[in-house]
Amino acid sequence: MSLVAIVSGATKLAVSIIGLGTKLWFLPTFLAAFAYYHYDLFDPENRPINVKEVLPKYDFVIIGGGTAGAVLANRLTEVQNFNVLLLEAGGDEPEIADVPILSIYLHRSQIDWKYRTQPQASACQAMVDKRCCWTRGKVLGGSSVLNTMLYIRGNRRDFDLWESLGNPGWGYDEVLPYFKKSEDQRNPYLANNTKYHGTGGYLTVQDAPWNTPLGIALVQAGVEMGYEHRDINGEKQTGFALFQYNMRRGYRCSSAKAFLRPVRLRKNIHIAMWSHVTKVLIDPNTKRAFGVEFIRGGKKQVVLASREVILSAGAIGTPHLLMLSGVGPAEHLRQKKIPVIHDAPGVGQNLQDHIAIGGIAFQIDYPVSVLIDRFMNLNNALRYAVQGDGPLTSNIGLETVGFISTKYANQTDDWPDIEFMMTATTTSSDGGTQTRKAHCITQKFYDEYFAPINKRDTFGIFPMILRPKSRGYIKLRTNDPMDYPLIYHNYLTHPDDVRVMREGVKAAIAVGETASMKRFGTRFYRKVVPGCNGYEFFTDEYWECVIRQYTMTIYHMSGTAKMGPADDPFAVVDHELKVHGIQGLRVIDASIMPTITSGNINAPVYMIAEKGADIIKELWKSTKKERKRRGVISNNSTNIKKRHGSKARKNSQ
Ligand SMILES: Cc1cc2nc3c(=O)[nH]c(=O)nc-3n(C[C@H](O)[C@H](O)[C@H](O)COP(=O)(O)OP(=O)(O)OC[C@H]3O[C@@H](n4cnc5c(N)ncnc54)[C@H](O)[C@@H]3O)c2cc1C
Ligand SMILES: *[C@@H]1O[C@H](CO)[C@@H](O)[C@H](O)[C@H]1NC(C)=O
Ligand SMILES: *[C@@H]1O[C@H](CO)[C@@H](O)[C@H](O)[C@H]1NC(C)=O
């Protein structure tokens, strides 16, 4: 490896960090070590290529290079005579995103869209302006570049439910092969269970290279409480386990790294970064999508799609673009002066997310927690850079998962209603710097609640409700595509959600009472949550109040362009992910979930994209006659030229 490469690696890293606006004392040493041993330099696959010029026309244009978009770009270009353009608003992944422990520093950085919800009284009362902060990836790889890499498939009943709602082909038995298709399971014991796990796929799944003693103790605590220690991505879900992660040798394995880097040299794949899509072009007469309008380098451009346009802009970007393109609730579009092409009342509705309660903390007597100050040193940086293990591979302390059923769930069934995300940290572990900012907690709330345990040894349990009944929505602020839409989370507006969350807190506190945890001197942090002083401690009313203060999003926005049959007026796409009422347009991302899955949703999004890619390939590999029979028409190139020839030629110059 040449000195030039090392220096340029170090410079690039420095630039990316400065760009992220972090001020970390340890970074100079870390940077040197990291650059010296940088994995990228050995990586034969290296970085995706950002095309200089976009061609006038492609077979497929994919909007959004996130979790789903990257999979689609890869799978569609496996067919040599398809050519594909992937448009992404952000740029390539910064090196800092590779380091698991630093993921919290990516929030509110340049690669975050930095959405804020509208202020609502039902939740997020501890946040600045009472608005939750919704981090979303604006980068190649999308939210898989900022997430905590937890790999969880959800429950078989989630998918059986999708099927029962009128979506043939989406039951568990039919989607399982698509989970396995992506997977490269690195744990030999799990991999041996070939009924549930795959090896050799693009997406690496591995165990944590390093854990604190709290990780396994929390699994033991679950066993003590009567839960099985099991593979939660296997036959059954209820139980406790150490997390499985989308990591590769201790580095992040984002969708861009997994699916785009290995195919960067394919002739039929074009990736255009820094391309902000403003509209899908749909012929109002034939109601067929024929192209995409986007802004790149300050210039508005048009690209045509002869077969299909695929929306993979995520659960906020996708409904936003549909509405800007004239597909959405007609009345709302008219108000915003957007010509209605198709009245689709479900666009932007059915917004679902997983929330947990922040601040459920336990103090301990041993120096074992993941404290930034404890672990950020030269030794650990070197260990990380050279061996890909050690504390810097910690996903900000997220080590153990538990799936439990509260009294509101069917006890004889394996369909838990609460997930515990258990961490060897709490919000106070970094002294109120980065985590507080990422979650938009007010300084006042932090000082009152967390300051007494600043940088102390603690662990945390985030009880997360798996199938909330509350539904939010997204609508346009204006018809300017650069204006963010308005987001109404509606968290905890359904009383059942409050009940389940309340039971979740009680069960979390019980984990701290087990002998396995008492060994560490564990005691629940009994500080009254600011804003809830009027309630008697430990009563249901008190917990209800607590839930509405530090309401923590787990960043699982979904459902805003839901899949369902044509007779469901709120369904936006059919079971082949085609937009109802429009030809040549599909949605393939987290938006299509009719109901949110029972677990972190990144793995299901990979599955949706894998299955979607197969549906598309199957259609376009069929004969013209067969397609005609199915009512599919291709864009006739002469028509396209008539309508958009001059613009299309312009971008190729
Ligand atoms: C902080 C955080 C932590 C998370 N942790 C986990 C976890 O540990 N485990 C888990 O399973 N899930 C986790 N998630 C959720 C998971 O990562 C997302 O649900 C998943 O990545 C969504 O995939 P997607 O393809 O639907 O959207 P995204 O991956 O968000 O991709 C959408 C892409 O479209 C682009 N785009 C949007 N609008 C436009 C436009 N107008 N023009 C061009 N491009 C556009 C975006 O820039 C983005 O690249 C987390 C998410 C976040 C943000
Ligand atoms: C793999 O599974 C087979 C039977 O299914 C078993 O005999 C073998 O011991 C297993 N190997 C490992 C490493 O678990
Ligand atoms: C609970 O789950 C069991 C097992 O799946 C099922 O047979 C039963 O009908 C369920 N009960 C209710 C009330 O849904």
Image (cartoon, grey):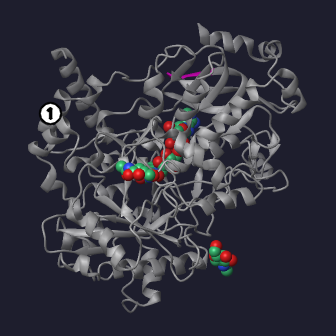
Q: Amino acid at mark 1?
A: Ala
Query: 104 or 503: nearer the eye?
Result: 503
Query: 105 or 173: nearer the eye?
Result: 173
**135 lies left or right of 618:** left
Furthest-top residue in view?
653
Q: Residues within 10 Å of mark 1 (few under 14, many from 20)?
A: many
Q: Residue 583 location, x and y as percent?
A: 80, 33
Q: Residue 377 location, x and y as percent?
A: 11, 46
Q: Quadrant of residue 380?
A: top left
Magenta segment main secondary structure: strand
Query: 208 or 188: nearer the eye?
Result: 188
At x 42% / y 86%, what residue is drawn?
Answer: 542
**Quarter in which the C terminus is drawn:** top right
Q: Residue 242 location, x and y as percent?
A: 34, 60
Q: Is residue 569 above or below residue 80?
A: below
Q: Is residue 253 above or below residue 633?
A: below
Query: 595 or 152: nearer the eye?
Result: 152
Q: Is residue 484 visible?
A: no
Q: Is residue 197 visible?
A: yes
Number of callouts = 1
At x 86% / y 27%, what residue is drawn?
Answer: 626
Q: Residue 137 location, x and y as percent?
A: 45, 42
**337 lies left or right of 12:** right
In this picture, which residue range is highlighted in magenta? 297-301
Q: Quadrant of residue 223?
A: bottom left
Identify residue for label 1.
Answer: 33
Q: Quadrant of residue 633?
A: top right
**Quarter in which the N terminus is drawn:** top left
